[in-house]
């Protein structure tokens, strides 16, 4: 079992900003997929920023504790009982109460309104698979919440875990100055591929640091995927969500313009699928990219929710899912992936990591396809970013480039709407006319 590391996470500064600016006027709700490190960072924050804290894990606490939140008439009694049960002394405006896995106790979430108004303590909630319909349909959602989303560790956080604080700031300088990395590129790309293989789940990163063995890391990732599959069975006992999730690598590998549900589910299973897909999206285990029918600044206004692509929220998990047919992904496969020598076309892995990076940096995902002039094929721009009054199209390639036909055709078709255009790929920084050829690890700076 890997030791529990407390990694430096960027969300800590946002939590600190909440504490200083809101000063108890709202609770903090930290949303994210299971095992992205929510509980760890919240407890670390409570330990460092407060005189004392009380943590209630609703996934394992007693019915007695849960029942305390069904009647809020006497808050003095509730706080007295909680302090007695958890052996913690709470101090006015110097303590925080943590509701971990708050979706397991809807009454506690509803109680936030009154608890915040009372003002004695700060409150932090964490939740996974928070479905408004399934877990909160019978309660009043508190408006006194500041909500933050937490994602798997990004590349910079991964480098921090490896005690490297120099790489990403240096990459940023090369990006800002529009310079190629030159001799440093090969090592930079190999380092980034390591991140793609290990991923950003803290348990997997801990295992890598402890063992330096990618097969053991893979075993940890399999445990997390099994946990997600179990969660999907809870929100969808029919098993459709689990099957849709497991099929993500094969669907992306088809290089199709959409996720073809029909290749995973039969006709009867595809009925009433909207709620299942929404629950998957809310779980934050997957990232969904929607087709933009008319690419313009308001991408959401012209998106097609029936035409989409689905990505795994963590690319490390994606790689494991792609080789799910093997008991444990052998170190040989990982070594070939790391040295970029695996024969399989792994372009979809790079598409997945770009989707992950864009999501973590606050972007909603959209793409655009349209038929070629002879209508025998489709052009496709993999991602569209809305920046000011313009859009930035991105095409992702897993190797070097010879052409970027889709990008060129898109920029010709929508010339008045486009500002910057990018080919995101696995080679060094370069300019090709108006197109910026961007190393994949620099996507975070867009």
Image: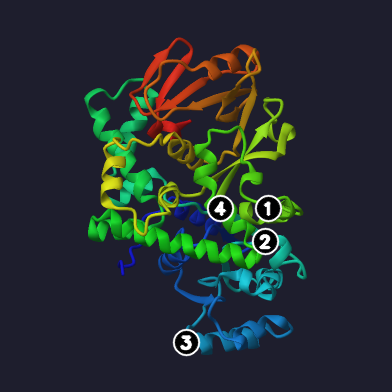
Q: Is residue 164 left or right of residue 280?
A: left
Question: In the image, is residue 302 above or below residue 217?
Answer: above
Distance, label 4 to label 2, CA atoms, is 17 Å
- Closer to the N terminus: mark 3 or mark 1? 3
Mark nearer the viewer, 1 or 4: 4
Q: Do tag 2 and tag 3 residues touch (Cβ < 8 Å)? A: no
Which residue does the numbered mark 4 point to in the structure image?
245
Q: Do tag 1 and tag 2 residues touch (Cβ < 8 Å)? A: yes
Which residue does the numbered mark 1 point to in the structure image?
278
Mark nearer the viewer, 3 or 1: 1
Question: Residue 264, how many percent across, how many down?
Answer: 61, 49
- Closer to the N terminus: mark 4 or mark 3? 3
Q: Residue at x 61, y 11 (%)?
A: 412
Which residue does the numbered mark 2 point to in the structure image?
131
Distance, label 1 to label 2, CA atoms, is 9 Å
Residue 305 in which image quadrant:
top right
Mark nearer the viewer, 1 or 2: 1
Which residue does the numbered mark 3 point to in the structure image?
87
Question: Residue 146, how many percent across, how many down?
Answer: 62, 57
- Closer to the N terminus: mark 1 or mark 4? 4
Q: Residue at x 64, y 39 (%)?
A: 308
């Amino acid at each position: 079992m890997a030791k529990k590391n407390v990694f430096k996470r960027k969300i800590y500064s946002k939590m600190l900003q909440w504490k200083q600016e809101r000063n108890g006027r709202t609770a903090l709700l930290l949303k994210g997929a299971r095992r992205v490190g929510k509980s760890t960072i919240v407890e670390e924050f409570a330990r460092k920023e407060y005189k004392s804290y009380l943590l209630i894990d609703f996934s394992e606490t007693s019915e007695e504790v849960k029942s305390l939140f069904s009647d809020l008439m006497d808050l003095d009694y509730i706080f007295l009982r909680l302090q007695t049960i958890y052996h913690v002394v709470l101090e006015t405006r110097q303590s925080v109460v943590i509701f971990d896995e708050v979706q397991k106790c809807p009454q506690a979430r509803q109680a936030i309104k009154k608890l915040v108004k009372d003002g004695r303590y700060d409150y932090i909630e964490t939740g996974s698979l928070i479905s408004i319909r399934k877990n909160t349909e019978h309660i009043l959602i508190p408006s006194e919440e500041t909500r933050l989303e937490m994602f798997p560790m990004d590349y910079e956080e991964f480098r921090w875990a490896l005690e490297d604080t120099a790489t990403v700031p240096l990459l940023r300088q090369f990006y800002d100055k529009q310079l190629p990395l030159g001799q440093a590129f090969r090592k930079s790309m190999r380092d980034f591929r390591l991140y793609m293989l290990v991923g950003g789940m803290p348990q997997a990163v801990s295992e890598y640091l402890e063992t330096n063995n990618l097969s053991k890391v893979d075993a940890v990732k399999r445990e997390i995927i099994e946990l997600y599959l179990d969660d999907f069975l809870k929100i969808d006992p029919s098993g459709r969500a689990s099957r849709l999730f497991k099929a993500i690598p094969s669907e992306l590998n088809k290089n199709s313009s959409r996720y073809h549900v029909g290749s995973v589910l039969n006709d009867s299973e595809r009925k009433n699928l909207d709620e299942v897909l929404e629950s998957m999206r809310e779980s934050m285990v997957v990232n969904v990219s929607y087709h933009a029918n008319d690419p313009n600044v308001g991408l959401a206004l012209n998106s097609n929710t029936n035409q989409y692509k689905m990505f795994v929220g963590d690319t490390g998990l994606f790689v494991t899912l792609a080789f799910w047919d093997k008991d444990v992904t052998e170190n040989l496969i990982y070594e070939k992936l790391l040295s970029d020598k695996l024969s399989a076309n792994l372009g979809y892995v790079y598409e997945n990591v770009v989707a992950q990076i864009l999501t973590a940096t606050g972007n909603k995902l959209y793409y655009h396809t349209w038929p070629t002039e002879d209508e025998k094929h489709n052009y496709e721009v993999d991602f569209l970013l809305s920046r000011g009054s313009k859009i930035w199209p991105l095409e992702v390639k897993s190797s070097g480039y010879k052409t970027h036909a889709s990008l060129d055709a898109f920029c010709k078709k929508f010339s008045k709407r486009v500002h910057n255009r990018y080919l995101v790929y696995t080679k060094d920084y370069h300019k090709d006319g108006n197109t910026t050829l961007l190393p994949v690890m620099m996507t975070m700076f867009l």
